[in-house]
Amino acid sequence: MPTKVEKDSVSGRLTTGHEWDGLKELNTPLPKWWLYVFLACVVFAAGQMLLYPSVPFFTGYFPGLLGYSQRVEVDRAVQAVAQQRAETVNRIGALSFEQIRADPPLLNAALSIGRITFAENCQPCHGTEGTGRPGYPALGDDVWIWGGSLAAIQQTITHGVRSEDKDTRTSAMPAFGALGSLKPAEMEAVADYVQGLFGLPPGKNAAEGQKLFVDNCASCHGDKGQGNQELGGPPLASRVHLYGGDRAAILAQINQPKHGVMPAWNARLSAPIIKSLTLYVHSLGGGQ
Amino acid sequence: MFGIKQETFEKNTLALLVGTLVVVAIGGIIEVVPVFTIETTVEHVRGVRPYSPLELRGRDIYVREGCYLCHSQQIRALRDEVERYGHYSIAAESMYDHPFQWGSKRIGPDLARVGGKYSNDWQYGHLMAPRELVPQSLMPNYAFLAETPLEYDDIALRMRANRAVGVPYTDEQIAAAKDDLIAQADANEDNANLLKRYPKAVTVSGHARQVTELDALVAYLQVLGTMVNFADTNTERLAQ
């Protein structure tokens, strides 16, 4: 039960005045420095509450005396940096590819923009510096499905391949096996011929396969398997292949072809950025 | 103070009870009141819709697998984030998330606007074997999701549960839940009704004979951040 505050004879401190069954409690206050820091924090917090958006009301919130908004701040920051870059970016947007390439400092800037944009957006599919992955074309070689000129690359990046964009590039190889337009033996024969184009030893029915190839495949892949960039028919007379270079891959693709999708980037990236990206991709080694 | 001594409370259980209640209530009110003002903090933007049935199940799997432990879904209003990921996230975009998946860890990249950034094929391939596509990735393989059939017999109940906490699913949407789910998981199905009910829903297909958990997860990822068209809004309008 509470008693009166008294001085403890052992420690020399005051008690709190509480006593339970003969036990008394020493009064050990918080250190002064701690107390003052705490009070200063309280004052600081009150100041922050006044200056910055803090208390919610039922019809809004107290915006603070400074009228600060992180969203306004970020708009300002993005605009400021856009202004810094405006001169370069506008020039990239306005000039033709030839003009940009004739201006080394501008070309360097465009390649830097392209490299960074590539790393964030394109690398997950096309690999570091466009090395490619099965199903995702390598960009550093000179084998192109839709063309390796600057204009062709720009078109592909802007509108994508089999994307949602209305100007998308698109092609579809028929499922020759799954739809039954080629019998299994005929598919084998075509594969006999195509593996020759791939650089493997041709199979025994390659001659028959070539006839079938000319009838069924040449309209998109070219009569010698050189490909057709207008139609997006990949070159087959090549060592670089999207879905693998062995016989099993050839047969799988004839039977039930896979078709990759590349998103259209015009929704996410502005035209000058796409132009820079085009220059970067073109510079990876295979640009035509 | 006010002539009330500590002794009064210590000696009187009723006073102690009432006093405790008053003190706890003050803290409680400060914590609870802002929740009732939440309507005033959600921006009025067009386009945000409840998740389609398949996306909703994909979201369940996202939560179950703990994706939020490495991926945030909140682009903060900071310049570098806006430049990398796109428009900063707004409250309206997660108003139908129960619970939201903002997260605070970025062991992997932010996913708030990953929808449509990569092709469906990439999402399937990457979830099954991330290092096949991104050699330096440290994300686990989720190949088992492609072999796990999706349970969706209870999809209508799940939608009702969401409706109970404020997601405006209509009776029509709940009645058509299974059809919509199947339509979204099969590229050969007619998805006109699905798109009418859930604009911008992305049809996915892992080419399995049945709907898998991976189908659901990809459908969910492909819609993230795509609902609001930020071209027809700005900071001033968002602040209203």
Image: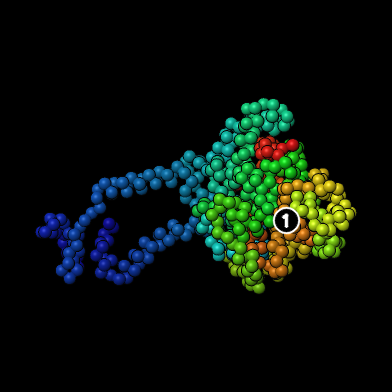
- For disc 1, the marked residue is A246
Q: What residue is shown at x 17% (from left), y 70% (from top)?
A: A21
Closer to the camera, A234 or B5? A234
What's the coloring here?
rainbow
Would residue A272 be found to the left or right of residue A196 on screen? Answer: left
| Residue A245 in picture, x, y percent from top left | 72, 53
Closer to the camera, A172 or A189? A189
Please, what secondary structure does the residue beneath circle 1 have?
loop
| Residue B200 in picture, x, y percent from top left | 70, 55
Would residue B155 be found to the left or right of residue A195 on screen? Answer: left
Would residue A72 be found to the left or right of residue A125 on screen? Answer: left
Report if residue B50 is visible in the image: no
| Residue A84 in picture, x, y percent from top left | 58, 31
Q: What residue is shown at x 56% (from left), y 50% (from top)?
A: B136
Which chain does the numbered disc 1 sit on? A
Is B160 placed above or below A121 here? below
Q: Quadrant of residue B178?
A: bottom right
Label 1: few (<14), some or many (≥20) within 10 Å?
some
Report if residue A8 is visible in the image: yes
Give the amino acid at mark 1: Asp
Q: Which quadrant of the figure contains the N terminus of chain A?
A: bottom left
Q: Quadrant of residue A271?
A: top right
Q: How many marks?
A: 1
Q: What residue is shown at x 62% (from left), y 36% (from top)?
A: A113
Q: What residue is shown at x 78% (from left), y 47% (from top)?
A: A237
Q: Which quadrant of the figure contains the C terminus of chain A?
A: top right
Q: Quadrant of residue B185?
A: bottom right
What residue occupies the far top of the structure in this picture?
A103
| Residue B135 in picture, x, y percent from top left | 58, 51
Closer to the camera, B98 or B65? B65
